[in-house]
């Protein structure tokens, strides 16, 4: 073998681009990352949606979103080092389920209340002015007049004469 054909070992290794250094956060940022998980944004969004999803009317829309973002945040929290945002995502999922149960329960209760009050005809009319009472009384009066016309002998005014 010719010594000019042999390449030294240093020339085989590519030294032009160094390997990227692992990203290590300072201790202060690591603690803050558990308080506000900025690298797990679905967990953070789900957390806030779950808190506001417990409010009565807006919770109908936010509680399902909190559940969805919470599940996505749980998956992403398992992939990140030190499970960043896993607690926020778990809270979002559980509170979203509770908020959905409460909000949809209230919606069903209000719907049933309105349905039953409509069936009982107490809403939106006052109890003494029901829209269906006048026609029934009018029909009863007409029915009595027709019976009197059909059976004139039962009329007390004619029997007295």
Image: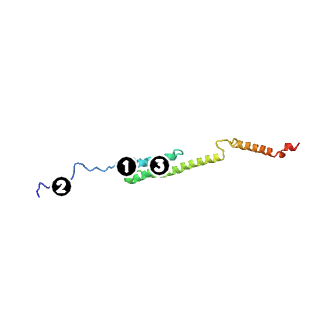
Q: Secondary structure at mark 3?
A: helix
Name the residue located 57 percent from the left edge and 49 percent from the top edge. Answer: 108
Q: Secondary structure at mark 2?
A: helix
Q: Nearer the viewer, residue 68 or 29?
A: 68
Crowding near the residue tagged with mark 2, few <14, some 14–19, many ≥20 C-alpha atoms within 10 Å: few
| Tag count | 3
Q: Which mark is residue 66?
A: 3
Which one is in front in this view, the residue at disc 1 or the one at disc 2? 2
Q: Which mark is residue 11?
A: none
Q: Which of the image's four quarters has the N terminus?
A: bottom left
Residue 156 percent coordinates (x, y) = 85, 44
Q: CA distance from mark 1 to mark 3?
A: 25 Å
Q: CA distance from mark 1 to mark 2?
A: 41 Å
Specify the quadrant of the image occupied by residue 135.
top right
- Residue 153 visible in the shown view: yes
Query: Outermost residue, front direction?
Result: 150
Residue 10 percent coordinates (x, y) = 18, 53
Residue 70 percent coordinates (x, y) = 45, 51
- Whether label 2 touches label 3, CB < 8 Å: no
- Mark 2 — residue? 9
Crowding near the residue tagged with mark 1, few <14, some 14–19, many ≥20 C-alpha atoms within 10 Å: some
User: Could you tell which of marks 1 and 3 lies nearer the N-terminus?
Assistant: 1
User: Could you tell which of marks 2 and 3 lies nearer the N-terminus?
Assistant: 2
Q: Is residue 6 left or right of residue 23?
A: left
Q: Which mark is residue 30?
A: 1
């Amino acid at each position: 073998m010719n010594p000019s054909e042999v390449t030294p070992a240093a020339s085989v290794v590519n030294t032009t681009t160094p390997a990227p250094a692992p990203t290590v956060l300072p201790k202060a940022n690591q603690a803050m990352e558990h308080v506000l998980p900025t690298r797990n944004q679905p967990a953070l969004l789900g957390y806030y949606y779950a808190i506001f999803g417990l409010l009565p009317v807006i919770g109908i829309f936010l509680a399902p979103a909190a559940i969805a973002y919470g599940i996505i945040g749980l998956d992403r929290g398992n992939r990140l080092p030190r499970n960043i945002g896993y607690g926020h995502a778990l809270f979002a999922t559980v509170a979203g389920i509770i908020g959905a149960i409460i909000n949809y329960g209230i919606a069903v209760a209000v719907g049933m209340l309105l349905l039953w009050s409509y069936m009982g005809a107490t809403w939106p009319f006052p109890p003494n002015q029901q829209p269906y009472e006048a026609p029934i009384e009018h029909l009863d009066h007409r029915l009595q007049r027709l019976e009197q016309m059909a059976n004139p002998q039962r009329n007390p005014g004619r029997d007295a004469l």
